[in-house]
Image: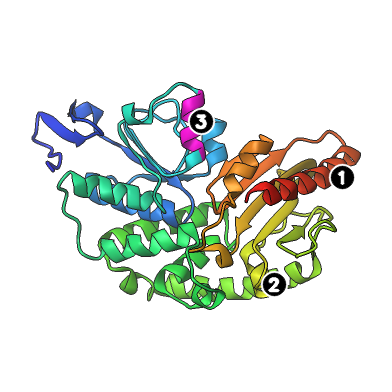
Amino acid sequence: MLIPSLEAMESVVITNKKLLYMKESEMYQSIITHNDFDGVVSAALCSHVFKVNKILFAGPSNIARADLMITPQDIVCDLPYPLDCGLWFDHHEGNLQELQYRNIEASAIAGKFDLQPSCARVILNYFLENNHRFPDYFSPLVEETDTIDSFDYHSVEDWRTETPGKIIDATIRSRIGEHHEKRTYLRNLAFWLRDNPIGDVVKKGDIQSRYQDYLNEEQEMMNLIKDNNYFLSIDSEKQIIILDFTNFNRPGFVIKNLAYLLYPQSLAVLEVKNLFNRGIKSNDLAFSLSLSINLNHENHAKDAGEIMRELNIGDGHQGAAAGKITCHSKDEMLRQKRDTLDRIFKIWQEQV
């Protein structure tokens, strides 16, 4: 692959079908990526290829609300396709379906969509196929990203075993610190992972300090899970753990997969909570469903993303998905919560 130079009159950028020649004024200026581990690694890969140092972090809702001005000078990773961008990389099936609803062919978009375990895998494969050479340390980094983003573990013990990627992922999940500080940390992570093996990166003092903060948070999360879980009465086999935080008057946060430490034989965990608007509790509901490690490497038909899509409340992967419901009163919220939990479980039962 030809890397753009300051002296070149034209620069070569790899696209799906062909080489697209762009003038210097049209060079990529920023990377806009998901604010999770996969998004950070995706940014590290793209920053390595294009020497772009401006990295912005966002969630899917930021793209849906058009909170960011995105132009053909931007590379978008691990997020829904915006109205316009220079390159787009993604692996979420729901985002592909959204393109189909809009009569947009993913293959016509510069970049690549592929149903891989992580967006980082899509990006790595894309540039390897186009003869770009990466340092050797990127391969194990993307392998661990695949496992973390797809929650592809063989057992609870496997999931709980510390690895460099899991430690860094935990520091990203931690809610300690101000918004601006967190964004700075994510950018630093992207640069560290771009330039160094992950085994060296994880030894940095900032990461180790944040990981200890996370471990303290994790104990608090376990206490919340113990006090706010139940199973639906129709769920006689206790397949789906319900984590219900709708009684909370302040925003709370748990990593719902920790519930498997209490119920290791369950097949899924479903979190329901109220949405907050600038710290004020609303009647709107958020649902988040994840499949258990017990279903990994098993032949099954369970699909969390399909459940959210069938209910028309959200989207996600086969293994994890989320949705939202607008409610105009507390009574409607309680009714919608009860009805939606029942409908999710009934669809779950039909997935055989």
Tell me which segment is drawn in magenta: 94-101
Q: Callout 3, which amino acid?
A: Glu
Q: Callout 1, which amino acid?
A: Leu
The residues tagged by marks 1 and 3 sit, at their Cα atoms, a distance apart of 30 Å
N-term mark: 3 or 2: 3
Q: Is residue 164 above or below residue 328?
A: below
Q: Secondary structure at mark 1?
A: helix
Magenta stretch: helix, strand or loop mostly: helix
Q: Is residue 184 visible?
A: yes
Q: Which residue is mark 2?
A: 263
- Density class for disc 1 (Cα within 10 Å; few <14, some 14-19, many ≥20) is some
Residue 5 x %, y %? 12, 39
- Any mark on residue 334, and which? 1
Residue 69 x %, y %? 45, 30
Q: Quadrant of residue 83?
A: top left
Q: Nearer the viewer, residue 334 or 64?
A: 334
Q: Callout 2, which amino acid?
A: Tyr
- Density class for disc 2 (Cα within 10 Å; few <14, some 14-19, many ≥20) is some
The residues tagged by marks 3 and 2 sit, at their Cα atoms, a distance apart of 35 Å
